[in-house]
Amino acid sequence: MKGVRLDDTIAAISTGGMGAIGIVRMSGGDCIALADKIFKGKKNISLLQKKSHTISYGNIIDNRTNDIIDEVLVTVMKAPNTYTKEDIVEINCHGGIIVMQKVLEIILNNGARLAEPGEFTKRSFLNGRIDLSQAEAVIDLIQSKTDISRQSAMNQLEGRLHKKVSDMRSRLLDMIASIEAVIDYPEHDIEEDTYQTMEQKTTKMIEEMEELLKTADRGKVIREGIQTVIIGKPNVGKSSLLNWFLEEERAIVTDIPGTTRDTVEEYINIEGIPIKIVDTAGIHETGDIVEKIGVEKSKNYAEKADLILLILDASCHLEQEDKEILNFIKDKKTIILLNKIDLEQKITKEMLIQYTQNVEVINISVKQNIGLEQLVQQLKKLFFEGKAISAEDGLLGNVRHKNALYQAKEAMEKALTTIITHMPEDFISMDLQVANIALGEITGDCVDEEIIDRIFTKFCLGK
Amino acid sequence: MSYIADIIDVAVIGGGHAGCEAALAAARMGMKTVLFAISLDSIAMMPCNPSIGGSSKGHLVREIDALGGEMGKNIDKTYIQTKMLNTAKGPAVYSLRAQADKVQYQLEMKHTLEKTENLRIRQDEIIELIVQDNMIKGVKTNGNSIYECKTVILCTGTYLKARCLYGDTITECGPNHLMAATKLSQCLKDLGIQLYRFKTGTPARMNKNSIDFSKMQPQYGDDNVVPFSFENTPEDIKRNQVLCWLTYTNEQTHDIIKQNLHRSPMYSGVIEGTGPRYCPSIEDKVVRFADKQRHQLFIEPEGENTEEMYIQGMSSSLPEDVQIAMYRTIPGLEHCEMTRNAYAIEYDCIDATQLKISLEFKNIKGLFSAGQFNGSSGYEEAAAQGLIAGINAVKYIKGESPIILKRSDAYIGVLIDDLVTKGTKEPYRMMTSRAEYRLLLRQDNADQRLTPLGYELGLISQQRYQHFLQKQQQVTEEIKRVSNVIIAPSEVVEELLQKYNSTPIHTGIRLSELMKRPELDYQKLAVLDTERPELPFAMQEQVNIQIKYEGYIKQQLKQVEQFQKMEKKLLPEDLDYSTIKGLRIEAQQKLNAIRPVSLGHASRITGVSPADLSVLLIYMEQQKART
C-alpha cells in the first residue's frame, strides 16, 4: 500500500565529501539500535550506551554472513539536536561507493527503509527544524527528484529483471488467488493447492529469487554508473580519450558493443566510481550531409547523459559547429577538454569564457598524457558532490529493487515455514501477500484489486 | 393538492435490509422516524438466496450485531440451518452462515419495527425529495402528502426504475413482481445526482415435491450452533435443522445453454446494466469457463412452511422454455416443477464516490444513502451501510461528528471506505481478501471491537454492556492464567504430545507456549491444565486465538499502528486542492472530487502518488504553523 510513513528508520547514501570517503546516514525510528546490530566497535562498547554527538571507530559487519565490510567511523546523534530532530546515525565509510552501497544494503536488510528523495529534508521540515519559507523548496525537491527516480526506474524496468519478476509475481498471485478463492467461496469445488504443491512452488520461487539476487550482485557495476558521453567533431581525440581510459586498465568491467547503431558503450570504474561512457566516435563518418546530423545526434546523446565530456581540438580555430555545441551544453553538466595542447594552441580557456560559467575546462593532451590525472580528480569530485545526479539515483534505484527482492524472499521463507508446519492457509496467504507487495515495488504494479481480479479470472464462482 | 402529513426527524426510503437497520438505529437513538416502503409485506424481503452470512458477510452481520443492529438477532430467531464455514482455514476467516426461513425473517423484522418506539412504518412510494439551498427539507409521497424532515436516508435497493428480464419478456417491476419506483430517479437527477445502471439476477424456485433428492448429496448443518448475535447463547437458539442438497450441471445442460445463448437478453444486448462477477448467471459461467465440465448447485429450502426450493448456482435470464429444459437436465431435477422462473433485474444506483465517508451526499446536506443503491450487492452489505447511515443521520441532526469506522476497525469500515473512495463498476461484494487487517477483524471478536461504540451510541443496553465487560475480563484473566501455567515433563504429557504428533518436552514449558504449536490448542491441552475454569465456548475460543496466534496478531497490530498515523492526519473538508502548489493536476482533480477526510484516506485514491501525499503533508504543516 502506498503511503507516507512518518517516523520509521530511513537511510541513504549521502555523498557529502570528496574522494573515497562517504557517509551512509540514518534517521528516525530505532536507527541507533539498528546501527548497533551491524557495528563492532574497537572498544566493544554498545552504540546504545554512547552519549549524543560522539564518534566511535570500528567495523561494519554483515550480520547475515559475519563478514567485515568496511572500517568506519560512526557518529551517534540523539534527538532533538539533530538535522531532522530525530535520532541520527552517520556511518563514514572508507571503501568507496561500492562499499557504501553494501553498507546501505545491510542497513536496509536490518529493517530500515530507503529514504525517498528529499526525505531527510522533509522530516527536518515536519519536525519544525526548517523554516516555513523553505517549504516550497522542499516540495519542489520532492516532485522533481521523484520524476528523476521514476525515469530511472523506467529504464531499469525494460530489462530482463522486470520480466523475471513479473513472471514470478504472476505465479505468486495464482497461489494467493487459489487460497483466497477457497476462503471466500468455501463451498465451491475449487481445485485447491495441496500443502505439498504449495511447498514445491514456494521453494522454487525462493530459489529463483536467490539466483536473481546473485546476478544482481554480479551485474551491479555493469548496470549502474554515471552515463557519460564523449562528444566533439571528428578527429578531436574522442576515441583516443576512450582508449586511454581503457588502456590505463582502470578496472574495466566489460564492454557491450553497439547497443545503438553507431556508438560504443564502455563501462569503467575509476577508484570505485562506476562510469558508463558512450563514445559517439562513429557519428561523423559518412560524408558532408551527415555533419548536420552529427551535431543533432551529439545533442541527442548529450540530452540523455548525466555528464558530458566535450573535446575541442585546441590546435584548430573554434568553428561554427563547435559554438553550436558549446551553446547547447551551457546548462548541462559538462567538462570541456581542450585536447592537443602539446601543439600550437589556437583555443584557450579565456576564449571560452562566455560559454563556461558553470563548466570546468581542462587542458589535456591524450597523446602526451597531460592533464588526464586532473580529469580523473574532476570526475571524482563531481560524483562525490552528488552533482552527476543519476549516479546517485541510479545506484539507489537498484538498491531499492534489491532490497525489495530481499524482503520478498524473506516473506517467502516465512511462508515456507508456515506451509511446512501446516498452519492454516490464511496465514500462508498473509506471508505470500507480503512477498507480492514487495515484488510489486519492483515492477511498479498496483496491488489493489489485483488479487480479486485474479480470483475471478481463474475460478468460476458465485451463487 | 399536497398537504403536510407530519414533521419528523428521519425519513427512510425503502424497507429492505438497509432501510430496516437505518430506521431502527435512528429511532433507537431517539429520533422521530418514518420508514416508507412500496409494500409493507416486502419489509426485509430476501428476493434472492435464502441465507444470511457466509465468508466475510458473516463478519458483517457480527459487526452489525456488536454495534446494536438487528440482522443478527433476526436471523437467530428465524434460521433453519446453520454452519460455521472455513474452520480449517484460520481463525480470521471462520465464517458463520445460516439458512433463513424467508417469510419468518420478514415477519419478525416487520414486527420488531412496529414495536420500536419513535418508529412508524408507512406503505407509500416517495416520489420527490424536497431540497432547499442544498439541504434536505422533506419528502413527498405518491399520495401527495409531505413529510417535513431533517434527514432522508435513501435505501431504494433494486427498485429504482427496475425492470426484470428473461428471454424477450421484459416487465417494468422490482424483484418478485413488486411495483418498481419509477418517479424518484428523475428527481434525483434534477438534484444533480448521477445515476448508473446495475444488473443482477436470481435463479428459479422449484416445488420440493417434484425433486428427486435421492440423486443429490445431503448437506447438514452444524450440531454445535453458534449464534450470530452476541446476545444469544447456543442453548437459546438450538432447534431442529433442515437439509440442503448438492447436485451438478452437466454437458447436456451446457449444450442447451450454448444453443440458446442468442435468446438471452444479456447476450443479445438488451440488458445495459453492469452485472457482478460475484454472482454470474449460468450463461456467464458456461461461456467464461467453457472447459469446466460441471458446475455445482445447492438446493436450499426457502422456509419451513413452504415447499419452494432455491436453486443456488443457476441464475439465468434465458426464456422460460429454455430454463425448464436446462433445469430438467440436472440429476434430481428431471421432473422439476418451477414455481418462479429465474430472471435478471436492472436498476438505478449511484457511484458512491458522490458520498462522504459518513454516507451523506457531498452536495446535499442531510441526504444519506445506503445499500444496493450505493452500488453494493448482498443483504449483509446493505444492512451494514443502513446501520451506519442511520447512526450518522442522527449525528447530523444533533450537530455531532459522524461515526467513521476505519479499515482497521471493521469490515464495515472496509466496505464503506472502498465504496466512497474507489466507487465501483459492478455490484460490490464484501470479501475477506479486501480486508488488509483481517486477522484483527475476526468474527469472534466483533464485540470487542465495536460494542463499546454501540453502547456509547445508545444502541447497546446497559445490561448487555455489563455482560460484555464481564466477558472481556474473564478472557483477559484466563489468558494471564494460561501464560503462567508451567507444564513439567511427565508420562501423561508425553502421551498427549505423542497423540498429536508433537515433539516431546524435556524441561518445564509454559502452557501458552505449547498452545502455539500448530498441532495443539487450548482444548486439546485441557487434560494437562488441572486448574482450568469452566468457560463458555465463545470465551475459550477467544483465549485460544489470542494466545495461539499472538505473533501474527502483533505483526498486524504494528501495521495498523502505521496505518493509524496516516488516518489521524485530518484534511479540512473545504480544502481547494487546485490551490496547492506542487500537486500534480491529476491528483488535484481526484482530491477535489473525492474530498478525503485524512491523509490515509487520500492515499487510497487511485491517481494520488506518494509524492503528492508528501506535498499534502507539508502543506498541512504549513497551515498549522500559520494559524
Image (tube, coloured by chain):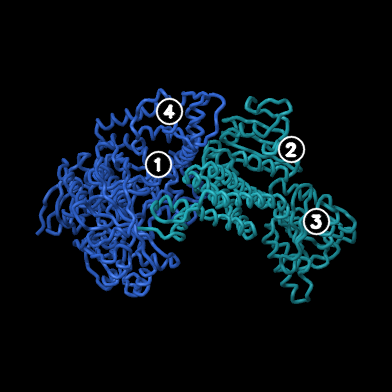
Chain colours: A cyan, B blue
Residue B290 locus on image (x, y percent): 43, 68
Q: What is the secondary structure assignment of the residue under circle 3?
A: loop
According to the image, label 4 marks what residue? B527
- Front of the two marks 1 and 2: 1
- Front of the two marks 4 and 3: 4
Q: Which residue is at the front of the view, A40 or B278?
A: B278
Residue B608 locus on image (x, y percent): 47, 52
Res. A82 visible in picture: yes
Q: Residue at x 40, y 55 (%)?
A: A188
- Front of the two marks 4 and 2: 4
Q: What is the secondary structure assignment of the residue under circle 1?
A: loop
Q: What is the secondary structure assignment of the residue under circle 4?
A: helix
Q: Residue at x 34, y 74 (%)?
A: B260
Give, as a three-letter code, the residue at label 2. Answer: Asp
Give, as a three-letter code, the residue at label 1. Answer: Leu
Distance from disc 3 to disc 2, alpha carbons, whole Å, reads 42 Å
Label disc, if present, on residue B441 of the rendered structure: 1
According to the image, label 2 marks what residue? A70
Label disc, if present, on residue A216 of the rendered structure: none
Distance from disc 4 to disc 3, alpha carbons, whole Å, reads 93 Å
Which quarter of the figure has residue A367? bottom right
Tag 4 and tag 2, C-beta contact below 8 Å: no
Chain under numbered label 2: A
Tag 4 and tag 3, C-beta contact below 8 Å: no
- Front of the two marks 1 and 3: 1
Residue A49 locus on image (x, y percent): 63, 24
Give, as a three-letter code, the residue at label 4. Answer: Val
Q: Which residue is at the front of the view, A335 or B479?
A: B479
